[in-house]
Amino acid sequence: MKTLYLLLSLTLSTLSNAWNINGLGEFSFEKLGSNLLIIHGPSGEPSVKNQGFMNNPGMIVGNKGVIIVDPGSAYSVGKNVLKEVEKITQKPIIAVFNTHVHGDHWLGNQAIIEKYPNAKIYAHPQMIIEAKNGEGDNWVNLMTTLTDGLTKDTIVTYPTDATQHLQIINLDSEQFKIHNPTITAHTNTDIMIEHINSKTLFLGDNSFVDRMGRFDSTSSMHNNIKVLQYATDLGLDYYVPGHGSSGDANHAVKPFLDYLLIVQDEVKKGYEEDLADYEIKPIALKKLKTYQNWHGFDAQFGKQIGKMLLEIEELD
């Protein structure tokens, strides 16, 4: 009876300490590889309901320390990610990787550095430049607005170490390889991080699952296609998208790559027939039925037809 009581108490304690976000569910690290874990964040845009949290923080446990990939969108989110880390291990965090400049992925740096001030933060050199030139503050302000002030305590904490393409980084018992084969893809600040030990690639927002990404003025849809083809050719075991569930290349890379290839093909045909973007849109839509339930499809699809058309015109 005493044993049963202890087990029940532990269960209730674990449940009460779970990161439960406003009815969206409980969020904790899920094992992908033997020492590789991911929190798969909720879908949707940053809001009061999701507390600004929406990305996929990663955690790699080395012999003596922990490495984090993309610790989230705000100080408060980073604090919750830290709590989830500490449920797995008490080893210190020794390094962080930031995949790109969009703040929903890296503003949680603040919480990590507050507790582990000697941890290095790795990022693309252009990300460091842009973050320091105002993008960091812009994202803090945006997150604060979208969450009605819930994330207002966030202070921009910049990456410390610039990376380069094919750089090998040894951290504790773990080895990482940086991939940024094009100047611009989802942004002009992207890196993909390969965890060599587990044959895993963190894609950042170069890929999504069940969610539609945005392409702004610093992006290239053509290069995003090239990057995803490059990622697939690496032949790794696991792929972690910036948003959505992780898995092999067929699950986490191919669907979004196929989407981009269909958009590219249909827009190219329309361009050759001298069609406007609004004329191409309904034609392309017929071939994209499987994507119409992806989060953000309605808001982004028309913009992406227009973006692809501009790129094709520029390349002609």
Image (tube, rainbow, N blue to C red):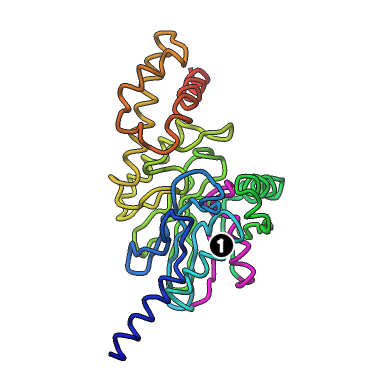
Residue at image coords 33%, 82%: 7
Amino acid type, label 1: Gly
Residue 62 appears at what percent x and percent y? 43, 73
Give the answer, above or below, for where 68 lies relative to 254: below
**Quarter of image, res 77:** bottom right
SS category of the residue bearing label 1: helix
Toward the top, the furthest residue is 274
Residue 137 appears at what percent x and percent y? 70, 48
Give the answer, above or below, for where 189 lies relative to 95: above
Inspect this view and state whether residue 130 appears.
no
Magenta-tinted stretch:
91-118
How many residues crowd mark 1 within 10 Å: few (<14), some (14–19), many (20+)? many
**Quarter of image, res 112:** bottom right
Q: Is residue 239 magenta?
A: no
75 relative to 186 in the view: left or right: right
- Quadrant where the image shows the N terminus: bottom left
Give the answer, above or below, for where 29 lies relative to 53: below
* Residue that label 1 marks: 78
246 or 254, nearer to the observer: 246
Residue 127 appears at what percent x and percent y? 61, 48
25 or 78, nearer to the observer: 25
